[in-house]
Amino acid sequence: MNDVVIECASDIELELESALLFYRSQAGSNIYATKHNARVIDGTPALMPGVPLTLDQLADIAEVAAKRTAFRGFVHERVVYLAPNQIAWWVPARTRRVWFATQDELGTRSGETAHPPLLFVVNKTSWFVFALRQNTRPDPSTKLYVAPYYNVWEGGEICTGNVETPDTINSDAIKVFEDAFFRSRFTHSNATRLIKRRGGAEQLWLDLLDGAAFPMNALVDSKTTLQQAINRIANERS
C-alpha cells in the first residue's frame, strides 16, 4: 500500500475520528454505508460498531467533497452536459484538416474536408464521438448518429492509441480533446458500418478529400439520444 501524503497550508495534527464503510451489491447498482467511530485501544486503532448512514448524511458528505473537487469557472458555450469527471459538448459542422495512414486506398494522405456536426462525451477513462444530423445545439432528446471516422469503436468510443489526452475533465480541456482527435492519424475502421453508401467509409473519405460535400442523409442512426448516451456512458464508468 502506498503512503498517503496530506498537504495543508500550515502544520496541522490529525487524529483518527471515524471511518465510513461502503457495501456494494454484485450488480453494482445498490450501495449501503455505515459510519464507525474509532478508538485507540492499547495503542492500536479500532473501529466501533457502525450505524447506517442516511441519505441526508451521504448528501452532506457529497456536498463537502464537491466543494473541493467540482469545476469552477466559466462554462464553454458549446457544453451541453457537465458533471464531476464527465463533460459533453457539440462541434458545429465545418471544414478542417484530417490525416490518414491506412492500409486501404486512402493510404498516407491528408487534406481539408467537410465534417458533420459532432458531439463528444469525455470521462476519466474513455471518450466518445457521435454525429448530429442538424447543425444546431442538441438537447437531451436529440438523436445521435454514428460518427463515420476511422479509429472509433461500435458505440462511439474513440481508440486512443498513443494520443495524449488531458488529465482534467472541464471546459478548458475541450480544445485539447478536439485537437487530439482531429490531429491524430486515422488508421483503420473499428466498426462494421460507419456510413450508408457504396464503398463505405473508405469511399466517403476519398470523396471528401476530393472536395465533396458531406452527405448528411447517409449518416447511420445510432439508435440513441443524447440523454440515453450520457446515461449509458455514466453507468459504464460506475
Image: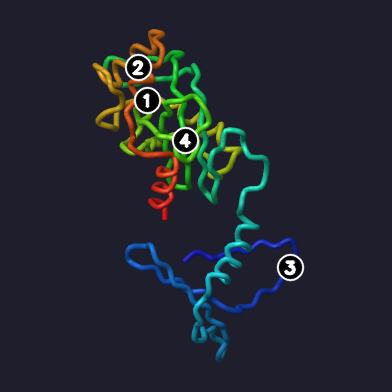
State how far apart marks 3 and 1 are (Cα): 52 Å
Distance between the alpha carbons at the discs numbered 3 and 2: 60 Å
The alpha-carbon separation of the residues under discs 2 and 4 comes to 20 Å
- Earlier in the chain: of badge 3 and badge 4, it is 3
Answer with the quarter of the image where residue 9 lies: bottom right
Which residue, given by chain and number where applicable, does mark 1 sit on?
A: 186
Q: Nearer the viewer, residue 4 or 149?
A: 149
Q: Amino acid at mark 1?
A: Phe
Left or right: 128 as drawn, with respect to 94? left
Q: Quadrant of residue 58?
A: bottom right
In this rendering, is residue 205 above or below 176?
Answer: above
Residue behind mark 2: 205
Q: Residue at x 54, y 83 (%)?
A: 45
| CA neighbours of label 4 inside 10 A, class few (<14), some (14 to 19), many (20+) | many
Image marks 1 and 2: residues in contact by CB distance under 8 Å: yes
Is 26 drawn above or below residue 150 in the view shown? below
Location of mark 3 (residue): 11
Q: CA distance from mark 4 to mark 1?
A: 17 Å
